[in-house]
Image: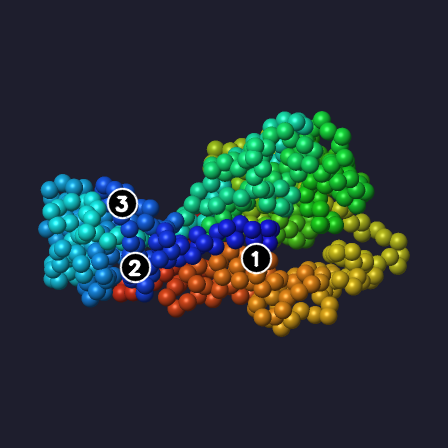
Amino acid sequence: MFSMLLSALIVLCPLVRAELRGCSDGSIEGLESKIGITACKGSWDGHIHNSGHLCAIGWKVCGWDDAKVLGTLKWDESISIEGCFAYNAAQDGGMCEACTGEPKQDDLGAIGGSCPYTQEKAPSCLSKGRIDASQNGTCSYQEGITTGVLCCKLPERAPVIHTRLPGKMKVPIKGHLTIHCHTSGSPPPIVRWMHNGMFVEEEAPRIIIAKTGALYVSDVTEADGGIYTCAAINPAGEALESTLVKVTGGSGLLDHKKKVDKSENGCADGSVEGLKNFQDVAACEGAWKGHVRKGKTLCAEGWRVCNQDDTSLLRRISWETANGINGCFAYNAANNFGKCTSCEDDNEQSNMGGLGRHCSQRRRARSSCLAEGRIDVYYGKKKGGTPSCTYQAGLTSGVVCCKIVSEIRPKGEPYCENTCENGGICVGFNRCRCNNDWKGALCQIPVCRPGCPAGSICIEPGVCSCSKSDMGCTDGRRSDKDYETESAGLMLKGNTCRRMCLHGGRCERGSCFCPAHTRGRYCQEALVPGVPYDPPKRYNKHNKHRPR
């Protein structure tokens, strides 16, 4: 999925460069050595809070509430800057308050050697000395006096998609398709739409992407059916939300529900709803009556609804894969208290587990039957929910089916406790024979021939991910251009960091290597010179604070 974001990254790069500098035009007029504050040249109309257009996305005009950052400016560097750069604070009587224009709150603060009022030993918002941009007491722009403003960096926040897309949508042929995608983040994220893995381009008037992020498609054809994904991207990360659109009333030649052998697929109707790359686990759509174990009617012959005895299969499903499935598919196990037990309709064993992005509760830091995280089909009682082990229309999409492995086998038949993957064949007890493209105990490791260049790894059969741009990546391997885009901080194929490395950090082998002026797992905490580092609180038995 990360490689799909390459086109959006190209659009985002100019914004990233401006965001790193702090000024909307990408320039720096002063304070080059400072982190989180910069001087930006330009004019504005009226009150200084109207000057926000001079700051880049993710930045704002510094104000009285930024006294901690302003306090890092020393007198010598504040007075040495050419011009006069204002900030939204009144310094009347040595105070640091909001500049309102009232008689006692109208001495507009600033830095720069050309400001009309400077006094080295007077108190103000700065660490030492006072500099005012207003000559006659005003909070507005004054031509010939004010050169620009000071911009302060806003806290970064990864994108969040607030629109929960349905697992499936139906639209008639020649009809109209509308999908909304409301997002938030800091800086505001860029929204791009993908259709079956390809970015959607506007073709007015038939295909329109609104500024709000909504996608409008008119005169729908069969080719418009498939998976639509809303991708929200900013320098702090990305968020994805998908839905399957099915066009009705057509010839049916472009049916995106692939039909395969039922016994091999795992679903009774032979459909593929999710987990199609797993041989022994499948997500099967449908309804049932009563306890989740009765959902076995949705499973093919030789399969059953997964339960607590199938943890070896469920633990193969990563957190990303579990949340990449549209809908919510239940299995016969309860996640109460982080344990994996059979699902029973009582107070202690009723939080039925599930897979899918539309399940009620998804908590990555909790333990369950999965290898990582916990997904519950229904909300718990603490949140006013009614957890149970039964089907509820509108909340449950189907069941997770696991292949039944019979312990009674013909004499001499080879048996492997874990299924050989990627086309491998079990040839002896826990021994797999792999094809030429895979190796490993379960045929889970890809093979690249004649081998990957130094400094790169094999991520798919015949596909290497290069960590250096001078390795000459060719023949399906990552190109130099792909490597250059990595400097913008977004994750690409081969970069295994879960989040973007900030403030100049570099992702190597799944971890961020951070510059000396930063702290945090993802270099997200920039140190302010002269201000002692205050690490975030961590939860322990003596501290009741829990990180959100």
Residue situated furthest right in the rendering: 411
**Could you tell which of marks 2 and 1 lies nearer the N-terminus?**
2
Judge whether 406 appears above or below 30 on screen: above
Q: Residue at x 32, y 49 (%)?
A: 54
Q: What is the secondary structure assignment of the residue under circle 2?
A: loop
- Mark carried by residue 29: 2
Residue 137 on image: x %, y %: 13, 46
Q: Which residue is mark 1?
A: 492
Position of residue 24 in the picture relative to residue 513 (left or right) = left
Return the residue nearer the eye: 343 or 528: 528
Q: Which residue is mark 3?
A: 44
Residue type at tag 2:
Glu
Q: Residues within 10 Å of mark 2 (few under 14, many from 20)?
A: some
Say how the picture is coloured: rainbow
Residue type at tag 1:
Leu
**Residue 475 visible, this angle:** yes
Position of residue 198 in the picture relative to residue 485 (left or right) = right
